[in-house]
Image: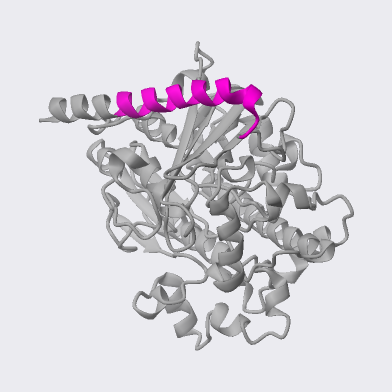
């Protein structure tokens, strides 16, 4: 599981500017879901939804910083699996057991205040090497810090880069520990979440390319943003979350550099995935193994004039999702129907023959993986409460079907409506266009039905659990 990786970052899924040979192989040989959508556009609520099987409003985890630690991983342990986490889970507290037998915690690359009271495995490794881990405290001293928008290069030892360190810690476990009868390993790679910090040798490929999709939002597009996103743009120029000091009008070259660094970080991760696959094969795991790859959400990377996530645009809400298990699933299938990230929860439990916890709202993808009849979701939903980075709204909710997407902003007169058939880049907000009022009303009905059904479903499941 990567952090903040967009759906358009794998060459084999139609993005030739990417260099991702190992993910390309998994796509060619596995099952890829083209339309998987997150439950929340930031780390904590997205991951809490995935590991609880509950919508954010049902679990109560709707924003970053909220405490959560109960997961369905305990059900795998009850079914006989040895459960290991290496890297980022983003539980709060960070070191909660969360149902695992073993955790080797590596959190966000840049933890400014949190890093003063919590030392993860990478912090300890830096201390053992008598080195200082890169963070915004040091990056701020660079004369062009305000122009970099989070794009830096890794100048420390390669083995201490967060993504390489996590992958190699997982490899060390696989190589050195006795092989359990059944293993569930969650590997949380911290990138390509900012700081966008690849090693220089991975960056060369992208700096040399002229086909990187650099965004050029128009003045009309920026002016058409809802008020909460205009506030986010302002906020991000004053507060450098994750060492990203944003600019309201970055140059083409600055945005191109940002993209190159981000994509290079993905290529670094791709290389580690290849090494992990080799380790699994060498240690005899691949004979009876399911490999799942996904991210928790994406990144705007300057589209619509926006930094990072906390919005409901496609590059944030749509993520890569693939399953690879040559002995179980036919190779090279692409599934177009819609699903949600937390649908992985019952899928994993079903693959393992483990019980579902109660309450539980996600739906298993196993029929789709087996090639059986499966219709996917008619609507997908995403929700986010205001937090330290989304200061302009108390709650935003997305409702999306195959063609239309609406974003409701609690307490605000404005919102967003996009016709994804005629405007796939979401550049024309139709919220105020009277001729589309019927679509807003239809999607609002779907939203109300979803919330009411979710409430009743949770009540029924809680009653059954008692």
**How far from the left and from the top, in percent, is residue 193?**
57, 59
**Which image quarter holds the C terminus?**
top left
**How far from the left and from the top, in percent, is residue 222?**
70, 52
For this rendering, which residue is in front, 176 or 306? 306
For this rendering, which residue is in front, 422 or 24? 422
Q: Is residue 215 left or right of residue 227?
A: right
Residue visible at 24% across and 25% down?
456
**How far from the left and from the top, in percent, is residue 345?**
38, 35
Magenta segment: 432-454
User: Quick check: can you spot residue 377?
Assistant: no
Q: Is residue 186 left or right of residue 420?
A: left
> Relative to residue 33, is residue 123 depicted above or below?
below
**How far from the left and from the top, in percent, is residue 197?**
65, 68
Query: Residue 446: within the magenta?
Result: yes
Query: Residue 210: within the magenta?
Result: no
> Relative to residue 13, is residue 268 depicted above or below?
below
């Amino acid at each position: 599981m990567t952090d903040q990786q967009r759906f358009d970052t794998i060459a084999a899924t139609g993005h030739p500017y990417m260099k991702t040979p190992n993910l390309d192989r998994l796509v060619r040989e596995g099952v890829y879901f083209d339309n998987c959508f997150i439950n929340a556009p930031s780390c904590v609520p997205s991951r809490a939804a995935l590991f609880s099987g509950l919508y954010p409003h049902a679990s109560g985890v709707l924003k970053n910083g909220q405490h959560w630690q109960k997961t369905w991983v305990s059900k795998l342990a009850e079914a006989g699996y040895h459960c290991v986490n290496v890297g980022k889970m983003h539980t709060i507290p960070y070191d909660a057991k969360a149902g695992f037998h073993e955790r080797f915690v590596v959190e966000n690359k840049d933890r400014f205040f949190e890093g003063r009271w919590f030392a993860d495995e990478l912090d300890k490794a830096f201390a053992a090497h008598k080195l200082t881990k890169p963070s915004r405290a040091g990056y701020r001293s660079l004369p062009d810090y305000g122009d970099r928008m989070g794009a830096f290069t890794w100048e420390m030892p390669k083995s201490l880069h967060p993504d390489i360190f996590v992958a190699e810690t997982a490899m060390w476990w696989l190589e050195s520990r006795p092989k359990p009868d059944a293993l569930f390993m969650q590997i949380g790679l911290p990138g390509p979440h900012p700081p966008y910090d690849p090693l220089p040798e991975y960056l060369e490929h992208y700096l040399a390319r002229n086909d990187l999709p650099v965004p050029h939002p128009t003045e009309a597009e920026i002016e058409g943003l809802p008020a909460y996103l205009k506030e986010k743009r302002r906020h991000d120029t004053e507060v450098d979350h994750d060492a990203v000091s944003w600019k309201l009008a970055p140059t083409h070259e600055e945005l191109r550099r940002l993209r190159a660094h981000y994509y290079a970080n993905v290529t670094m991760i791709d290389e580690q995935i290849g090494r992990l696959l080799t380790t699994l094969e060498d240690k005899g795991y691949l004979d009876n193994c399911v490999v799942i790859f996904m991210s928790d959400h994406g990144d705007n990377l300057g589209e619509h004039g926006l930094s990072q996530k906390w919005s409901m645009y496609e590059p944030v809400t749509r993520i890569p999702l693939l399953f690879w298990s040559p002995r179980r699933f036919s190779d090279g299938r692409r599934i177009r129907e819609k699903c949600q990230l937390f649908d992985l929860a019952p899928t994993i439990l079903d693959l393992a023959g483990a019980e579902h916890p109660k309450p539980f709202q996600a739906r298993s993808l196993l029929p789709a993986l087996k090639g059986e009849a499966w219709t996917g979701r008619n609507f997908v939903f995403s929700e986010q409460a205001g937090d330290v980075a989304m200061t302009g709204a108390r709650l935003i909710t997305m409702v999306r079907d195959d063609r239309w997407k609406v974003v409701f902003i609690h307490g605000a007169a404005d919102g967003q409506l996009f016709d994804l058939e005629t405007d796939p880049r979401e550049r024309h907000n139709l919220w105020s266009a009277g001729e589309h009022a019927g679509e807003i009303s239809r999607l609002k009905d779907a939203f109300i039905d979803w919330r009411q059904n979710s409430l009743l479903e949770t009540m029924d499941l809680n009653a059954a659990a008692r």
